[in-house]
Amino acid sequence: MKLVILGGGGFRVPLVHGALLRDTADRRVTEVVLHDTDGARLDVMRRVLAAQASLTVRDSGAATAPPTVTATTDLDTALEGADFIFSAMRVGGLEGRTADERIALDLGLLGQETTGPGGVGYGLRTVPVALDVAERVRRLSPDAWVINFTNPAGLVTQAMQSVLGERAVGICDSPLGLAKRAAGALGHDLDDLEIDYAGLNHLGWLTGLRHDGRDLLPDLLADDVALGAIEEGQLFGTEWLRTLGALPNEYLFYYYFTRDAIAQIAGAPQTRGEYLVGQQADFYARVAAEPEQAWQRWDSVRRDRNATYMQETRESDDGHTQERAEADVEGGGYEGVALALMAALALDEPARLILNVRNGGAVVGLPDDAVVEVPCRVDAAGPVPVTVSPLPGHALGLVQQVKAVDELVIRAALEQSRSLAVQAFALHPLVDSVTVARDLLTAYVRRLPEHYDNLR
């Protein structure tokens, strides 16, 4: 099978490649094509993957040959004849990410790449590219499945579904990570439990974990020690989790503790994006200069990136930052979801995954064609959402508002409408003024004109 990775020069590509190297199925990915607009980054990533494959073969004595890896900056060449397309693009690069953070912070708002005004700005410049990719996929590899990790993942998946239908599926590792931590705190393997989780990407709640028909989540919520030991207990506080009666996705920190998050991000010497600009520039330059150290340098940087992920959410009142759990630092996760999804679709190996898919009535209160994030059963026929509990009013209201913003972003990008773009900013629950919404768009146009000056 042929797998195309869009954003193939990106730093996290070895996570997907590593999962492929561990796959021993008879029908597996044998060809990987990396696509990126930056040829120099592609060259570096090919060196990292070559070293990774050599180390894996040496350490495991694998009898199967690793997938061949080629790279190209030509999108049509990459897409033609693909079986699976893994989309991990970052439209605007890290410069775009720093804009998503700093423009909002300068206006007193949350500066985060996928949540709040930053997510709206990211979506506005990403949707046109995603739609172009979808049209090319439909023409060059109409039977391919697109697995979307490009953020904002739910919004981008919904845009791509307008062209590809349900052959575009969004993935994220956050919900399954949350469910695994909760299951572990209860002393269970997640495979033995039925997951009740619903919402949108980066905006969902775990409302139940059932074993033989009994919901075990209330047991966890009542246990101060077990609840306080998991990342969500430390992040949100056990009292707030019991008040909600559910475990929120980690990104809901930005909604429940908005002022705290803004203060912590604004008080740091640099934003996450600004930190990554320097780190990544150093990484790619060093690997280009010392290719024999490609794998070692990548692995070292990976550990640092994972350890500092969403660091602002783990800062305590006394200024100290809590360390992430070792299992989370070892990280990954989304590559496992991607591989399990591909196996289910290509090999008809049933899987239960939390995915971004067409709603079809799964989440009561949202349109059928809205992309939601819910547990699914997956086989060769594709993902099918399972029944989930209705969201409580406060959660449903937030989901409905953010979904309405998602749809405005898609319309604004399609119609190249400045008015709709302003509406999308203004109606987001983390933007508190229409005037500020106009200022946001003006600042984006000024800083990244190549992505926004087509808005009329």
Image (tube, rainbow, N blue to C red):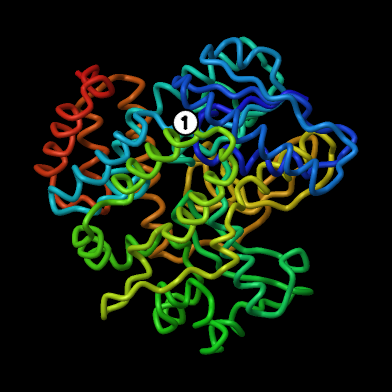
Q: Quadrant of residue 38?
A: top left
Q: Name the residue located 48 percent from the left edge and 19 percent from the top edge.
A: 39
Mark 1 Cα-neighbour bin, 10 Å: few <14, some 14–19, many ≥20: few
Tell whether 269 sits left or right of 363: left
Q: Name the residue located 65 percent from the left edge and 71 percent from the top edge.
A: 209
Q: Which element carries disc 1, helix, strand or loop?
A: helix
Q: Number of marks in the image?
A: 1
Q: Quadrant of residue 212?
A: bottom right
Residue 182 in percent (x, y) is at 60, 72
Quadrant where the C terminus lies? top left
Residue 323 drawn above or below residue 81: below
Tell whether 57 sits left or right of 181: right
Q: Name the residue located 48 percent from the left edge and 72 percent from the top edge.
A: 232
Quadrant where the N terminus lies? top right
Tell whether 399 sits left or right of 383: left
Residue 70 in percent (x, y) is at 65, 20
Residue 273 drawn above or below residue 213: above
Residue 375 in percent (x, y) is at 64, 54
Decide which of 442, 9 is in the foreground and name it. Answer: 9
Q: Which residue type does callout 1 highlight? A: Ala
Residue 433 in percent (x, y) is at 13, 48
Q: Name the residue located 51 percent from the left edge and 29 percent from the top edge.
A: 9
Residue 72 drawn above or below residue 329: above
**Circle 1 is placed at which residue position?**
289
Decide which of 395, 16 is in the foreground and name it. Answer: 16
Q: Residue furthest left?
A: 435
